Structures are given as structure tokens and as C-alpha cells.
Image (cartoon, rainbow, N blue to C red):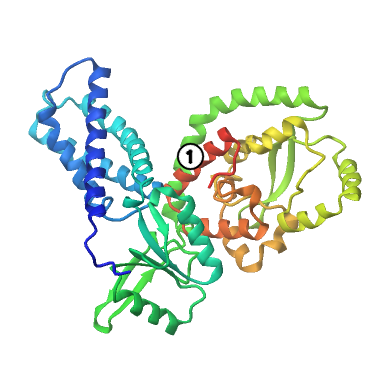
Amino acid sequence: MNSFKFNPSFYLLTFLLIAADFLALYLSFKIVEYIEGKSVDISSYLWIFIFIILTFAVQKIYLLRYDFWGDAKRVLKGFFFSFFVIFTVISLAKVFDEYPPSFILNFFLIAIFVTLVFKRVVKKILFSFDFFKLSVKVVGDEENYKIICNEIDKNWYFGYSVNDDIYDIVIISSRGFDIDKLKESMREFSHNTKDIFLIPYLDYLDFSHTTIVDFSNIRFSAIHIENRLLSYKNIFIKYFFEKAITIFLLLFILLLHIFISWLIKRDSKGRVFFKQQRLGKDSKLFECYKYRTMHENSQEMLEEYLLKKPDEVEYFNKYHKYKNDPRITKVGKFLRKTSLDELPQFYNILKGDMNLIGPRPYMPEELNDIGEENKEVILKVNPGLTGLWQVSGRNKLTFKKRVDLDVWYIQNWSLWMDFVIFLKTLKVVLLKVGAK
């Protein structure tokens, strides 16, 4: 139970992770050599390798364990900073003959991808051995204890294992504790545990984006919290990047649209598009476009089905969808499973009714179910074609959980989060799963 003991696995793991990053950089260098068809003296590039590794170390990649996306964010920051510094040094020294700009640029682009792949593969191998895993004691009420333990069990990238008796670190969830009990737990574990992670009571906020301000004279610390998606600067950044991505994808979307339209017409009689009024920014109604995924006589089919399956009514009241909807066509099932039924909403994005990523577009009749407090947050921004709700196991989420995710997304928005959601959406579409 004593975590102050010498831990050889930590030092060996750190050495192996640094070695893996060096190997990834070396392999990237050789790939660029092959692509450009020339031999380059690698010894003159070793200082670049070392500088990149140092930028990783400064961000504590080798000291703390982040999930894959946390690691990826720091790796990208390290590469971007390194590229800026190294290119500046090369420019000032005027040694472009020895360090050709095209070679440097290609090296950094390839190294980003290779390094991230290496990290996943190496950690997958190393954390398959218990020797490299950290034992974690989880402290919290029953609900949060299960949530945290489930994440530790499923997210192998952390390299954690739950052990309430012999442990290296402690994770304490504040929710469910009164302040005196929380203080007592912190005091108790700090006696013999070096690393304690405290999950704040306000767990609906992402504190990784906050700034801590010290009031030194009175020994207080204040956390600066910003509703990030209501900032004009962030709105502009989001608007610019989303429009750029939409325009870039436009030709591919048009080709895909032609193919899907043909499938719909071939599968069942009726129109290609289905439009429905949805709630937009400031509660304004707009026509939301989708591909038709149901038969034309869907209402009659549903009424007949519900008479035979009354339990579906209870399921709908909880999830706002039916478990086995008889109205959906064969092509419609595929389109819904891959979320391709929402592809026409790119037209809504171009019109300005929606964003590429945001809260889900709610129906007018769902307004009261959202809740008064949540409406004040969700309806302050444009809804999105995809969002956090869609890549977080959407088919298994209750309506309340979807609303909670939308509120969390708005209050904790970042460009990086949008990037991660965009990549996870591609996974949902390609693998036909509700990503996590």
C-alpha cells in the first residue's frame, strides 16, 4: 500500500517509451529518404530528434499517463512547436543545403503519424504485462466507482488495473462525499500515497481547459471557468474551420449523394429527401434535411406494430426511438446505422442553420423534455450534423444522457475536441458502430 517505495517498472517504462519515440523518428527519417530518393547523413539530424523528445518530456508525456487522445494532443503540440523552432534556427543559420525545407517538412508530417502509431502499438504490448501496469484504488460512491472502474478496465492505453488493497495511485471522486469526509480521505491517503487524482464535484466541467489563479495572501486558489462556445473568438475559429472542411469535402459528398439517392429510389417508392422542423439557435425553427429512411405509409405501419408490441411505447418514452422500428426500409437501416442518412444536412451547414459539429438538432416537441436550465445552454448555439452524443454510444444513450452530453460539449468546447469528434465520426460511419 505504500507508494513511496522504489518502482523499477516506472524507470524501465520511461526508457522504453523514449526509445520507441526515437525509433519512430528514425523510421520516419528513413521513409523520407526513400520517398525523396537520396541518402542523408542522419548524424546531422540527431539534435532535431533530441529536441523533439525534449518537447514531449516538457509536456510530461513520460511522467503522467494520459489516454490516447491526451497523448495525441501533446504529441501534435510538441511537433508543431519543434517545427517552428527548428525551421527558425535553420533559416537564421542559412543552412538550407544541409537541411532542405522539403525534407524537413516531409519528415515532420510523416513523424506525426508514425509516432502516434508507435505509441499505440508499444503501449499495447507493454501494458499486456502486469509489471508495467499501475495499481489504482478508486474511492467514490457506488455509481462513480463503477464508472471509473469500467473506464480503467476498457481503456487499456492508461495501463491501469483496479486494486483496492495494494495500489500505486488513488483516484477520488468528490461526488457523494461531504466536505469533511473528503478532507479526511485526502489526508489519509496523502500519508502513504505519492499520486492522488481528485475528480471535482463539478464533474460536468472539463478542468483541463481552465486556469488556476492564486490569491497568495489568503492561501486560496480560484478556477477560471469559461463557457467556451459563447466566446466570439471561439465562434469565429469554429466557423472558419468547419466551413473549410465542408468546402473541402463538397465534391466527395456530391458523388456520394448521387449513389445514395439511386439506392433509395431502387429500394422503395417515394422521395429521396425527408425534411422536418428542428430547433435551431435561439429556438428558431428550421427545415432539417435527411435522406428518407422510412416507407411512405409509415404511420399506418407503426400503429399496427404498436398494437402488437406495447412494450415499445415504454422504450420510446425513455430513449425517444423504437427498438425495432417497422417503418424503416432496408437501405434506411444501413443509412441510419452509419449516420449517412444525415448527409443532406451539409446543405443546412452551407445555409448557416447548422454546424458540422455541435449539439443534436432537437424536435420542437422535445423542447420541454430538454429542461429549462439546459435550454439556456443548448439553444444558444447552432445544432450539429454530428456531435459528442453521436460518438459516445448514441444507440445506448437515454434522452437525458444525450442532453447532458450536449451541455457538456458546449461548456467545454475546444477545437481539439471537435477534431477528435470528427475522427470518431468517421469511425462510426466506416465501422457502423456507436464510437466511444
Counting from the top left corner in percent of width and height, residue 431 is at 57, 34
**Residue type, numbered disc 1:** Leu
**Picture residue at 33% right of the left edge, 40% below the top:** 122
Counting from the top left corner in percent of width and height, residue 310 is at 86, 53
Q: Is residue 80 above or below residue 367?
A: above
Q: Is residue 67 visible?
A: no
Where is residue 329, by image quadrant? top right
Q: Is residue 12 above or below residue 138?
A: above
Could you tell whether 430 is left or right of 193 in the image? right
* Circle 1 SS class: helix
Q: In the image shown, does 148 or 356 lie closer to the viewer?
A: 148
Where is residue 259, by image quadrant? top right
**Picture residue at 28% right of the left edge, 50% below the top:** 61
Could you tell whether 33 is left or right of 286 in the image? left
**Picture residue at 36% right of the left edge, 64% below the top:** 167
Q: In the image shown, does 291 or 318 lie closer to the viewer?
A: 318
Q: Is residue 295 above or below residue 34?
A: below
Q: In the image shown, does 220 or 318 lie closer to the viewer?
A: 318
Counting from the top left corner in percent of width and height, residue 113 is at 34, 34
Residue density around tag 1, few if under 14, some if 14–19, many if 20 or more, within 10 Å: few
- Quarter the N terminus occupies: bottom left
Counting from the top left corner in percent of width and height, residue 234 is at 43, 52
Where is residue 42, by image quadrant? top left
Q: Which residue is mark 1?
A: 423
